[in-house]
Amino acid sequence: MRKRTKALNIIIADDDATTCHVLRMLLREHGHQVVGEARDGEKAIELCEMHKPDLAFIDIAMPRMDGHQATQAIRQKLPNVGVIMISALPTLENVQTALQAGASGFVVKPFNAIKVVDAIENCLKQKQVQKQG
């Protein structure tokens, strides 16, 4: 049995409603609170500024502003918000660009609970290390 992480406030940004729904249900099952959902990168930044979540799950391919740009903006404005990128295209380029933009993790769609929970735990570990450093 896994050690439960504390309940986190999380933003989801994905232009696909089904993806948002699946991720929201999965996060709630693990005791987390989804405090906002965005369908584009600009709205994701807005929601992060408003709610100051612990974490944001951000899709790469979105209208108005892609996930890489949104992640960069969120990490600059709110360095304490952990970002986990989600994408159906786990190319090396996508993963590298996500990490360069400041993402702490990468989850491939369609996702399963284990991958999502692992990404959250890794992101929290990174935040701990940053605080200590």
Image (spheres, helix red, strand yellow):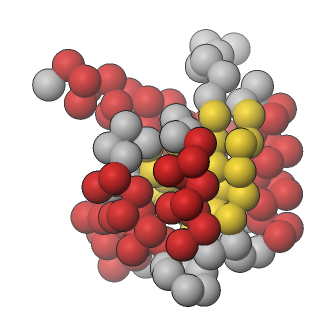
Please state the horizontal and vertical placement of residue 97, each as a whole percent of the image: 32, 72
Is residue 97 positioned above or below 23 on the image?
below
Please state the horizontal and vertical placement of residue 102, each as a whole percent of the image: 31, 56
The residue closer to the viewer here, 114 or 121, is: 121
User: Which residue sits at x=54%, y=72%?
Assistant: 42
Instruction: In the displayed orientation, state which residue is furthest to the left.
Output: 133
Please state the horizontal and vertical placement of residue 130, each as a whole percent of the image: 23, 30
Q: Quadrant of the N terminus?
A: top right
The residue closer to the viewer here, 45 or 94, is: 45
Is residue 101 positioned above or below 132 on the image?
below
User: Which residue sits at x=77%, y=74%?
Assistant: 16
The residue closer to the viewer here, 123 or 91, is: 123
User: Which residue sits at x=43%, y=43%?
Assistant: 82
Please state the horizontal and vertical placement of residue 70, each as a whole percent of the image: 44, 68
- Left or right of 94 on screen, residue 121: right
Question: Can residue 56 be seen in this snapshot?
Answer: no
Question: Can residue 39 be seen in this snapshot?
Answer: yes
